[in-house]
Image (cartoon, grey):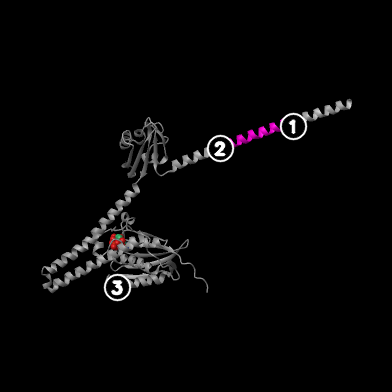
Amino acid sequence: MEIAFILLLGALAAVGFMLFRERQTRRELEATHVRELAAQRERRDVELRSQAGRTAALFDRMVEGIVVLGSDGRIRLSNRAAAAFFGFKPPAEGQTVLEATRHHEVAAIVGRLAREPEVLNHELRLDGAGGARFLQVNALALRSVEGANDGAILVFHDLTRLRQLEALRQEFVANVSHELRTPLSLIKSAAETLIDGGRDDPAITARFLEIIDKHANRLTHLIDDLLLLARIDSGRVELNLSAVDLRAAADDALDDAALIARAREVSLVNEVPPSLRAEADPERLRQVLANLIDNAIKYGRPGGTVTLRGRDAGGGMVEISVRDDGPGIPPEALSRVFERFYRVDKARSREQGGTGLGLAIVKNVVQAHGGDVRVESAAGRGTEFFLTLPAARRARAV
Ligand code: ADP
């Protein structure tokens, strides 16, 4: 009997222990579950926060300016680009478009959205301290499912660079037309003089044929230069690179210029050190040096000296320069001489048969090699044009 009682007690204790263990295990499981849920929620929150952060960063980093209006016509959301375009301090939330942009045309666009579903490709001009800025505006009215006014979204796209390029292109076309027309009209009037009886006089015939020949050459020169620039612009100039000995290249370019130098009694000096070598297209380099030497003779001092120098410029680059002892370039013109058609003295350049494109070609060709150009000049103390080019890699030992 006692044994049976002990066994019963033992069984009860075992059951109790088992129940206790089970409850404890369940509690542990529940706690783990709760912890897992909390961790999941935390992960989701972090993810949502970082997603929202990413969206906000993306919105703020967009190049287009964006302004979102609520149904009350006040700003709900605006990004950094919009603030920069109009010069307002973000956040502009709660302000009207007129308050934030201080631009009546933008407010008028918002007004139009009450009657029209969208206003597209509206061009806006902003006049600020940094010059005129052009924006394209696209605006869309937002409507609820029932068709009620639910605000609007305005997108501003900066067209300034495009407009500047268009203005440059127009100026270029105007310049080209002018440059073509001048020699053409001289050729035409010379031909007319001959037709109108001038050919009966051998002296007049000789003089006018000379005019025709000179200006036809000028036209050919201009068209060659224009075609070369167009090819460089579109990346169609192939460079046949090789290791070019700069002293020898300078000698060749100076030989080419010997005749015009003699006519002006200009001495040509080659001070480029031997064994200075550039990775360059020999033909293009010859053309570039010819242009600079030609200018140095044309715009330098009659009876003066043109000197070519060179040095290792460090950083894997070599430098070659063309110096004259002429009147120099005025400081205000120095930053413009590499522009197309820019001339310090138009009449002088034309009289010398210049196209105003020589230095633009020099700059573009040198940059196509991975180098650059610069000029130093002082009034009365001459001018020096410097070109840097990649140094030729050392020849492998044979
Ligand atoms: P151009 O066909 O007129 O010579 P370039 O592009 O070669 O055109 O040169 C632009 C202008 O820069 C020239 O018209 C001239 O006024 C000026 N220039 C160029 N080289 C020199 C120089 N060595 N000394 C003084 N002026 C120069």
**Is residue 327 at all visible to an observer of this figure?**
no
Q: Residue at x 37, y 40 (%)?
A: 155
Is the N terminus in the top left, top right, bottom left or bottom right quadrant? Answer: top right
Q: Report which residue position mark 2 lands on.
A: 44
Q: Is mark 1 within 8 Å of ligand 1?
A: no
Q: Could you say where residue 259 lies in the image, as x and y percent from the top left?
A: 29, 73
Question: Mark 3: which amino acid?
Answer: Leu
Quadrant in which ligand 1 is drawn: bottom left
The crowding category of the residue bearing disc 2, from other C-alpha atoms within 10 Å (few below 14, some 14 to 19, many at least 20), is few
Q: Is residue 36 left or right of residue 318?
A: right
Question: Which quadrant holds residue 332?
Answer: bottom left
Q: Residue at x 22, y 66 (%)?
A: 215
The crowding category of the residue bearing disc 3, from other C-alpha atoms within 10 Å (few below 14, some 14 to 19, many at least 20), is few
The label nearer to you, 2 versus 3, is 2
Q: Is residue 289 left or right of residue 16?
A: left
If you read the primary sequence from the N terminus, does the residue marked by circle 1 or circle 3 appear first? 1
Q: Could you say where residue 34 lies in the image, as x and y percent from the top left?
A: 63, 33
Q: Secondary structure at mark 1?
A: helix
Question: Which quadrant holds residue 63?
Answer: top left
How far is the residue under mark 1 from the one under mark 3? 111 Å
The label on residue 259 is 3
How far is the residue under mark 2 from the one under mark 3? 82 Å
The label on residue 21 is 1
If you read the primary sequence from the N terminus, does the residue marked by circle 1 or circle 2 appear first? 1
The label nearer to you, 1 versus 3, is 1
Q: Does 38 appear in magenta?
A: yes
What type of secondary structure mainly makes up the magenta span?
Answer: helix
Magenta stretch, residue numbers = 20-45
